[in-house]
């Protein structure tokens, strides 16, 4: 009656559009369920995330969703994926709960984000608690620092002055021009004069490709939903565990996705008892300092001009031999990251 | 015997059962979800344990998601899960 076959995401586009679902990006595997030659159901895996699951309305209620989920979950387990995430319609989430998935965030009645892992978010929180559980009156900043600029430094210094302790989370996803190791090191090297700041890798649960995929792709549709989910995780898991009372963020004049995210943050955090402070990026020559500006200068072969916008250790890195392959890649790339 | 690899068998379709088996130290953990849990969870557990005993499996984490499978199906899937986790093709 129905048969399954691996298909390309292109072939699933029409069905997904009909169902009002977004087209997943960076897909590694897509399954199609067919009746005769008609596609009636589909689901995809993008790295470790299951998404783009849908069944033609006329064929719903017949266990086709079960076929799709079985297939995708089996594939994930066979590929030995350690942390499997799934975005699903709120109404479908119980299908996954039965298979060992735990809900880590939701946008009520619309979307649920679930995770299946041996070392999942609970273990991550226990780890944070062990390391930082003794600190109170904490503020935090979440940044990419691609690369670390004077704007970033200003933000951290301000937070360090105004709070007992500051956690700086650095996005760990390696989809930015500067690799995570470099970005992380530059932050640590440039703040040695501050003794109440901890720099923490962002991990899977803070703006990662698992929890906020559109941050890293060109699509800005559905950014609001992903922003809400990421912020839910922040509120219910991270902020709670680390007793965070305030979050600082640099205002974002250049990037629509970041500004959407910041707006959601300003709506969601204060009603949950967390103060949000949006800071103007440090003005220099009347121009806002942003890492994208630095990358632009690099692309235009004007590295010397970055000197007035970045701290010394960052500039030393940019002109170093070690940085050459990274610089070359930036010059060649067209993406905003 | 020991579980080497994580393995998954079956599906969520009606009358089938999906079983995920994973390595675990020092314990045999069996978790059961079923659409007929209230009526049959004891019988489902018995069927799973029966196969575990047959294969002398003492250490493993077993997740069972049952969609109304008959005893023969439960046992067959469980056996397949064990064989797959040992790396044997089934």
Image: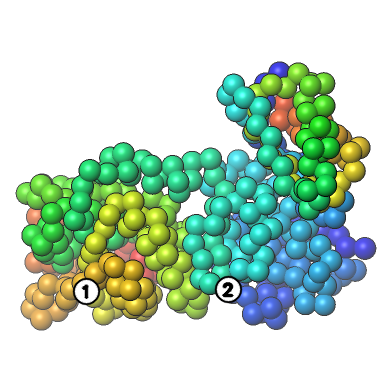
Q: Position of residue A56 (x, y in %)?
A: 77, 74
A24 vs B2, left or right, is left
Return the x and y of residue A313 as percentages of the image width and height: 12, 51
Q: Chain of mark 1?
A: A
Residue tagged 2 = A109
Q: Residue at x 42, y 65 (%)?
A: A232
The quadrant the N terminus of chain A occupies is bottom right
Asked whether residue A253 is in view, the answer is yes
Q: Chain of mark 2?
A: A
Report the mark closest to the observer, 2 or 1.
2
Q: Is residue A44 above or below residue A70?
A: below
Name, please, the residue furthest toward the front.
B38
Quarter of the image with the C terminus of chain A is bottom left
Q: Is residue B73 above or below residue A47?
A: above
Relative side of A285 to A39, left or right: left
Q: Is residue A257 left or right of residue A94?
A: left
Question: For this rendering, which residue is in front, A28 or A335?
Answer: A28
Residue A131, x across and y down, in percent: 28, 40
Instruction: Say yes or no: labels 2 and 1 on the same chain.
Output: yes
Element marked by disc 1: strand
Dot 2: few (<14), some (14–19), or many (≥20) neighbours within 10 Å?
few
Looking at the rendering, which quadrant does residue A301 occupy?
bottom left
Task: Please give the label number shown on residue A237.
Answer: none
Q: Which residue is mark 1?
A: A278
Q: Who's the residue at 45% across and 46% down the image?
A: A122
């Amino acid at each position: 009656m129905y048969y399954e076959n691996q298909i390309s995401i292109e072939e699933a586009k029409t069905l997904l559009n009909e169902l009002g679902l977004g087209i997943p990006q960076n897909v590694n595997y897509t399954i199609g369920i067919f009746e005769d030659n008609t596609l009636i159901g589909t689901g995809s895996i993008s790295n470790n995330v299951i998404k783009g699951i849908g069944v033609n309305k006329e064929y719903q209620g017949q266990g086709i969703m079960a076929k799709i989920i079985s297939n995708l979950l089996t594939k994930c387990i066979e590929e030995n994926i350690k942390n499997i995430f799934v975005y699903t319609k709120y109404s479908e989430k119980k299908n996954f709960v039965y298979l060992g998935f735990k809900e880590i965030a939701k946008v009520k009645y619309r979307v649920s984000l679930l995770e299946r892992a041996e070392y999942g978010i609970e273990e991550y929180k226990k780890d944070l608690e062990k390391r930082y559980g003794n600190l109170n009156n904490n503020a935090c900043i979440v940044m990419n620092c691609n690369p670390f600029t004077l704007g970033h430094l200003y933000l951290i210094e301000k937070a360090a002055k105004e709070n007992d302790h500051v956690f700086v989370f650095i996005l760990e996803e390696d989809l930015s021009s500067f690799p995570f190791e470099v970005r992380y090191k530059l932050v640590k090297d440039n703040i040695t004069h501050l003794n109440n700041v901890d720099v923490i890798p962002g991990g899977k649960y803070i703006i990662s490709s698992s929890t906020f995929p559109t941050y890293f792709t060109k699509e800005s549709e559905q950014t609001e939903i992903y922003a809400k989910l990421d912020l839910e995780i922040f509120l219910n898991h991270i902020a709670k565990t680390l007793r965070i009372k305030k979050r600082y963020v640099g205002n974002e004049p250049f990037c629509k996705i970041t500004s959407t995210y910041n707006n959601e943050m300003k709506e969601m955090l204060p009603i949950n008892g967390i103060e949000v402070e949006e800071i103007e990026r440090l003005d220099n020559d009347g121009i806002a300092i942003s890492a994208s500006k630095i990358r632009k200068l690099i692309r235009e072969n004007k590295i010397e001009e970055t000197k007035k916008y970045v701290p010394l250790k960052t500039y030393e890195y940019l002109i170093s031999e070690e940085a050459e392959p990274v610089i070359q890649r930036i010059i060649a790339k067209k993406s905003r990251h | 015997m020991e579980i080497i690899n994580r393995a998954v068998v079956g599906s969520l379709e009606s009358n089938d059962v999906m079983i995920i088996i994973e390595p675990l130290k020092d314990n045999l953990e069996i978790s059961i979800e079923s659409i007929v849990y209230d009526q049959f969870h004891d019988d489902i557990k018995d069927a799973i344990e029966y196969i575990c005993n047959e294969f002398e499996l003492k250490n493993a984490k077993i997740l069972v998601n049952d969609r109304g499978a008959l005893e023969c199906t439960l046992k067959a899937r469980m056996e397949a899960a064990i064989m797959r986790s040992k790396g044997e093709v089934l």
